[in-house]
Image (cartoon, rainbow, N blue to C red):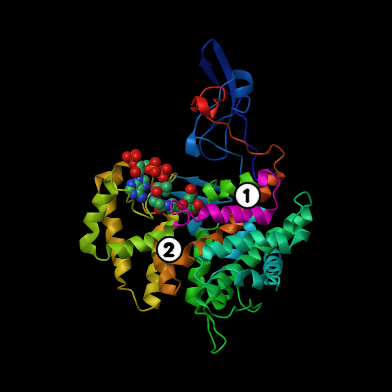
Amino acid sequence: MGNNRGYYMAKDANRSAQLTFGDKTLDLPMASPTLGPDVVDIRKLYAQGDIFTYDPGFTSTASCESAITYIDGAKGELLYRGYPIDQLAEKSHFLEVCYLLIYGELPSAMELEKFENLVTNHTMLHEQMTNFFRGFRRDAHPMAIVCGCVGAMSAFYHDSTDISDPHQREVAIVRLVAKLPTIVAWAYKYHVGQPLVYPRNDLDYASNFLNMCFSVPCEEYKVDPILSRAMDRIFTLHADHEQNASTSTVRLAGSSGANPFACIAAGVACLWGPAHGGANEAALSMLREIGTVEKIPEYIERAQDKNDGFRLMGFGHRVYKNYDPRAKVMQETAKEVLALMGVENNPTLQVAQKLEEIALNDPYFIEKKLYPNVDFYSGIILDAMGFPTSMFTPIFALARTVGWISQWKEMIADPSQKIGRPRQLYTGAPHRDYVDVEKR
Ligand code: SDX
């Protein structure tokens, strides 16, 4: 069994890296992970060498020690607490994956039942939060509503905002996992002008979400078990992903001691960007803009033209230089759902599959190791399920909440964590004195 922060403390190799510059040579300790590259520990670099490292975008920087998720970009492998994502997507279900990410181990049957009951019985929102939704314009993007409402949770759940209290941390974790589906579903219902549908304790997590989104008071709504399974699998595929931009945002916000609801709201805001979680919405819009297989070559050309701001949305990844394993599972799920919906000849799916085939054989994409990522197929499934594109990123945020809050929990418990405060490479004006306006 691992220590309180995960399976293995980083094994400090008895090796060090020598850094020589000017008349100085520094010995920098190295640490070996369970998986992945060794690290050079540069925490003392500025104090001993009076220099900074420079790594905009953190392409070569490990910002923390974590035992939650591991990505092998070269192999296209994703592990949640050591378990491969394809096995979890096939054999597990989202709430069991939540337990695994939060607590580090797969639950026993009794632990799982207890956790599922806990989440199920905390899916309702404070009734006064309904006023919060109604304060938005009807045409507000659902992500704006989700971001506002998650932040507002710190105004409704004061009794779980003290991060120094382990019990309050646990309560906040369960509340966030339990209530995000209600917030996201209500953001959708408000956006489309339909009555808010309350959660039901007789439905599983994914079915409950679909019911809150698609049922209406005037008729019976039966959740299709295949759609519910597909929804649950989409949640699992999006649950966590190492130190991506939004997770790093949550950790940085949390490092100042901000309450967990404020930290998750910061993660929602960061995820919204089209280079990150907003790519699923942008990918489907792009596939629709391409429209037909015949127009694909024109867009493949544009994606390579440095003077054209166009990029293939849903393609490429900072870490994966091979197929994103989530994209493979997502493609299979897309075929299942479209067949169920009787739209297996969906033109958008045909364009997506042809675009993938052409791109993966194009020298530009091969040389830059650009493959479909998690966002390339997810929009096709969500569209077939009846969600508007504006709901794609809110659904991503719903699923990623467990990853964000697991990483936040790990950070709070890490004795070496301190407030994140990067330095800079300053290239502005040197020191100069003020000049009165008459003399300028
Ligand atoms: C997610 O980090 C995560 O883990 C994120 C995520 C998660 O689960 O949290 O996996 C979710 O955000 C997936 C990524 C979704 N974004 C997109 O699909 C948007 C399109 N993709 C890109 O913008 C881009 O690939 C990124 C942002 C995903 C990664 O960018 P990097 O690592 O900073 O790489 P880069 O922009 O420096 O690109 C390297 C080269 C460049 O060419 P050169 O300047 O070297 O000539 O590849 C080119 C880029 O122009 N390139 C693309 C491209 N992506 C990169 N060219 C065309 N189309 C693309 N999609």
Q: Secondary structure at mark 1?
A: helix
Q: Which mark is residue 378?
A: 2
Q: Is any part of residue 369 visible from this angle?
A: no
In percent of width and height, residue 231 lies at 50, 69
Q: On the image, numbered disc 1 is attached to which residue?
A: 407
In percent of width and height, residue 167 lies at 78, 56
User: Which residue ends up furthest to the left in the rendered image?
Assistant: 294
Neighbours of disc 2 within 10 Å: few (<14), some (14-19), many (20+) = many
* x 24%, y 58%: residue: 296
Report the magenta residues as a range: 254-278
In percent of width and height, residue 365 lies at 30, 46
Q: Nearer the viewer, residue 181 or 118?
A: 181
Q: Nearer the viewer, residue 419 or 71?
A: 419
Which circle's residue, 1 or 2, is located before the other in the chain? 2
Residue 214's place in the image compared with 287, above or below, is below
Q: CA distance from mark 1 to mark 2?
A: 24 Å
Q: Say how many tags the image has.
A: 2
Does 73 sit left or right of 406 as displayed?
left
- The quarter of the displayed image where residue 102 is located: bottom right
Q: Amino acid at mark 1?
A: Gln
Q: Secondary structure at mark 2?
A: helix
* x 54%, y 10%: residue: 23
The verdict on residue 257 being magenta is: yes
Residue 365's place in the image compared with 125, above or below, is above
User: Which residue ends up furthest to the front in the rendered image?
Assistant: 438
- The quarter of the displayed image where residue 180 is located: bottom right
Residue 384's place in the image compared with 15, above or below, is below
Does 376 sit left or right of 180 as displayed?
left
